[in-house]
Image (cartoon, rainbow, N blue to C red):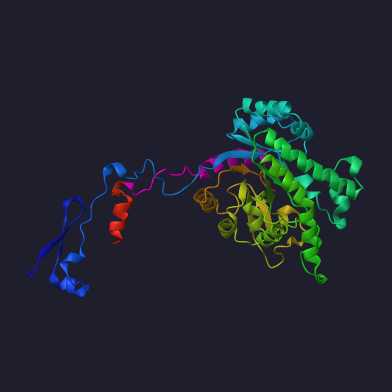
Amino acid sequence: MSKKFECLKGFNGLKVLVTPELIEQSNIQTIQTFQTIKLPNQSNLLNSQTFKPFNMTTLKGPGIFLAQFLGDQPPFNSLQSICEWAKGIGFVGVQIPTWDPRCIDLQKAAESKTYADELKGLVEQCGLKITELSTHLQGQLVAVNPAYDVLFDGFAPKEVQGNPKARTEWAVQQLKYAARASENLGLNAHATFSGALLWHTVYPWPQRPAGLVETGFTELAKRWLPILNAFDECGVDVCYEIHPGEDLHDGITYEMFLEKVNNHARACLLYDPSHFVLQCLDYLTYIDNYHERIRMFHVKDAEFNPTGKQGIYGGYQNWIDRAGRFRSLGDGQVDFKSIFSKLAAYDYKGWAVLEWECCIKHPEDGAREGSVFIKDHIIRVTEKAFDDFANTGSDENFNRSILGIH
């Protein structure tokens, strides 16, 4: 056998030289072991123009949740004027709180496609889109523990205050209106709270009776299943904001609820990292765990600075003096670069919506800065792999030859 011989003609005309020693080291018995590899026909190549290595979507936004900005003075006292203001500071979408009549007549939007079209048209004339509707206050009233009856009565109309059964029925109907209104507006996701029967027992003192949590989640699911079914009929996801004061306040409680509603396809999530900062929950791993259910995103910042005097519970202090408090975007501790990267990588298809809550900064400054902040964090996703320049092409025969499959 010769000292050196040509075994294989490689890519770009390069020749691979193999010595007898290499054959011996590789336990190769004969030169016939090597097969000629044919390069794929150029017409069969899956090039970068037709093949995307990842399915990713550029987030929509920036949007703004109007609830914290509505007021009695212009431009915050009507839907048209607040939309014009939002457009003027860089937003392209608005999330509408359905409990405020300055924005929407929810029942009318559910029952009249004409009214819904007019509402949508008004917003679009301002250069904006409706991102989603919100029933946070009504959703809270789907399940209220008697300990909170007096306080939560303020969320309901006077005719059902002091009557928990009537209040719950009103809230359930509001959610069903929201489902139909969302459909009439061409929306596919909806924001709400779960309400709570168990929150007063979140810390187990006195000791929780055996079976209490099971009973509570069974009842919560019983109340929500008809609502979820109504949303399903309308093709809209119910996005629960995981939030303190709700029975759905972390991943575990969401999973407990999901099991009780038979993993209902419409029982989805509104992701807001600020609430996780305040309870020391890993808000990035949360995305890994639940990205398939995340359909909405509130972009809200927060900080948690415990001291030797207070921690998570906050010592009954006002927001300004609490260890954990919400901040304007960029002023808190949330790692938004990682959040936006994860959501893009997981192909989140929804909106990035500012929810402004800050006990220090003026709301108009928070909104103006927030618009720029979100716009700067939205990642325009790539449509090709960065190493496409080195693409050698591919077809089935070529792949099999590389793997030695004959």
In the rendering, at what x and y percent does residue 192 appear?
Answer: 72, 47
Given residues 33 and 253, the one toward you in this image is 33
Seen in the picture, residue 202 relative to 53 is either above or below; the reply is: below
Given residues 212 and 159, the one toward you in this image is 212
Q: Which residue is situated farthest in the left direction here?
A: 2
In the rendering, at what x and y percent does residue 215 appear?
Answer: 80, 63
Q: Residue at x 80, y 45 (%)?
A: 172
Magenta-drawn stretch contains 370: yes
Seen in the picture, residue 31 relative to 321 is either above or below; the reply is: below
In magenta, the rendered stretch is: 362-388
Q: Is residue 105 left or right of residue 123?
A: right
Q: Is residue 37 left or right of residue 188?
A: left
Q: Quadrant of the C terminus?
A: bottom left
Q: Residue at x 73, y 27 (%)?
A: 115
Seen in the picture, residue 85 relative to 151 is either above or below; the reply is: above
Magenta-drawn stretch contains 61: no
Q: Can residue 102 be seen?
A: no
Which of the 4 quarters of the picture holds residue 44? top left
In the rendering, at what x and y percent does residue 287 appear?
Answer: 57, 55
Q: Is residue 13 left or right of residue 52?
A: left
Q: In this figure, what is the number of numbered marks? A: 0
Q: Is residue 368 left or right of residue 9?
A: right
In the rendering, at what x and y percent does residue 302 appear?
Answer: 64, 53
Q: Can residue 60 be seen?
A: yes
Q: Quadrant of the N terminus?
A: bottom left
Q: Residue at x 60, y 61 (%)?
A: 282
